[in-house]
Amino acid sequence: MIAVTPVIDRWARLDLFRQMLRIRRIEEEVARRYAQGHMRCPVHLSIGQEAAAVGACAALRPTDSIVSTHRCHGHYLAKGGDLPAMIAELHGKATGCCGGRGGSMHLFDPDAGVLASVPIVGSNVPLGVGAALAAKQRRRPDVAVAFFGDGAFEEGVVHEAANFAGCHRLPAVFVLENNLYSVYTRIDARQPERPLAAFAQTHGMPVEHVDGNDVVAVYEATTRAVVRARRGDGPSMLVVDTYRFLEHCGASDDDHLGYRPAGELADWRERCPIARMRAELCDAGELDAAIERAMEHAIATEIAEAFAAADAAPFPAASTAMEGVHA
Amino acid sequence: MPDAARTLAPRIVTAADAIREATAAAMAADDRVFVMGEGATDPKGIFGTTTGLLEQFGPDRVMEMPVAENGWTGIAIGAALCGQRPILVHQRVEFCLLAMEQLVNNAAKMHYVSGGRHRVPIVVRLVVGRGWGQGPAHSQSLEALFAHVPGLKVVMPSSAADAKGLLLGAIADEGPVVVIEHRWVHYASGHVDPAPVAMELDGPRRLRQGGDCTVVATSYMTLETLQAVDALADAGCGVDLFDLRVLRPLDTSAIAASVRRTGRLVTVDTGHATYGIGAEIAARVCAEAFDDLRAPPRRIGLPEHPTPSSRTLAEAYYPRSPSIAATIGEVCGLPARVIAELGDKLSRERDSVPLDIPHPSFKGPF
């Protein structure tokens, strides 16, 4: 990869921290309220994986695109997706980003460059490559980032899309978040032992393997990939190691199910991306209790307003269900 | 040539050439239109339907594809979400089966799920194979699979004029349109307007008028059925013949109105009869014109087994004009003798052409 290290000052670091904290608090509130039964759609929380979303999206412009997966809350929020529209969508309300037609797995916000989230594993990746193709064809200086997981790595369509991006040197960045599990099945039961990063070489693109719980590392690596893409040098890949704290789908802990090796979850909680950055910022004297309190207060206010708005919003009228089948 | 003479003189071209004309015209008119396909730039040019486009528009707009159908279908959808208007070409319907995930989950639903904000203006051209022993996985007519999915539009041209006009209509459409071309329709020729006039994707067209039976055919079977219907007319049996053209959205109002007059319905599919297009039309006609039916609707389609390769096995596989005429004749209560004479006449007309090729000029392999 090229030797670019973005300049990142205290305020940029504080903002990366704030964004991770915001996603964490939003998803914690979704989890806290989930059992009330007002959000009647599946939710795939990204608690524990915030650094990958925030670090990657911080390297992008609003005109750049991302495509996400069933686990899209963090990506959507990190790219600037509208919070009230997300919460309303989870409630099935008319004010949701999809007007109640998608639910939590279809979050999108074209104004913020969240092109699409789709819940078929791997299915979003060619959409991102298509956005990169359109940017090249229209000679727009835009970059597309495709988020996918270790499960999607097993899908042929991901390799098909990467092959195409490599062949045409498209401005795309493939961000593979390896959280070790596809639902309840660990990667070693699904794949041979191999470096996931070898994928990139196969498709003719450079790769960086980064600690996915180090938001600054993800940001810096993504920035290098984005600079490369924007100047016409083609796609790159990032392999980002991270870990999901809660169950695959739903709002609860699931360590009692026994599918994770004993102690693994506790180890990864020790490596929580938010706690880790808080410690680093405090050690450096860049974050103190007053700043964090102010962040927490602003986030809590925003969340309360989003949930109140979703509660108050109307449901879509059943009579509108036939609308918009054809453009 | 003066304008008046140009409009009077028929301009006979094949459907394959008409498709190429439509594509070139759409690409010239709008630089967001581009072609993607395995073989789109090769010497054969998708049966001649993309020949010359590479030279005219260059490799950025006539893009050769890797053998990765689901991948490049998703890439096309992503590009369409960003304002481009790709035309995807598959040399066989079966190749697109690998892309059903993208087509059904993403292309068909993006506009709906986004509350109307996203548009997916893609055209997916699929070719149905037939004959020359192509066998079970190169000659399936699977339009019912595509026509089942809300959000897709599905059209099947049966003439050169429709091949051009419906393709232009599909390219102009703001949503995903699947254009299913029968390989044997590529050889069909007729007058084609030199101007790029997009047809509305608006439903069936009446090809023959008659009072005894309503017949609805699709794609290549329209051509076989036309021969049957003209022979029936000579025998005094009048058929109201519709070429369905647009499978989804399906407009059966003209068909139902016809059945109210004729009291009889026969459908002729290029695909399997069971769960096929004819089944849907028959169900709708029964719902809309039950009291006027004088005979049970009949469906003609492929038998319930895969397409065999050997011509001895395949000979009875495809309905042809004699068997179509026989079914319509039975429904209309024609005497067995008349039906037999019709069959003999239609078979004699076909005699010089082997049953596994579309046209005497055809020398294989595709």
Image (spheres, rainbow, N blue to C red):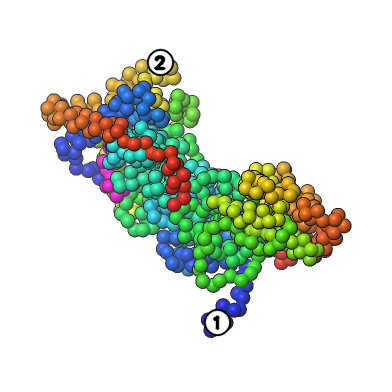
Count of marks overlaid on the render: 2
Label 1, label 2: how far apart the Cα atoms are? 84 Å
Q: Is residue B289 left or right of residue A129?
A: right
Callout 2: residue from which chain?
A
- Please name the amino acid that badge 1 sits on: Ala
Residue A117: mark in rendering: none
What residue sits right under mark 1 in the picture? B4
The span picked out in magenta is A54-67
Regarding residue B99, the answer to whether it shows in the image is yes
Image x and y of residue A242, in percent: 34, 29
Residue A256: mark in rendering: 2
Q: In this view, does B329 lie to the left or right of B33?
A: right
Label 2 environment density (alpha carbons within 10 Å; few <14, some 14–19, many ≥20): few
**Vertical relation: A259 (above or below) B82:** above
Determine the secondary structure under disc 1.
helix
> Which residue occupies the extreme bottom position in the image?
B2
Image x and y of residue B54, in percent: 49, 64
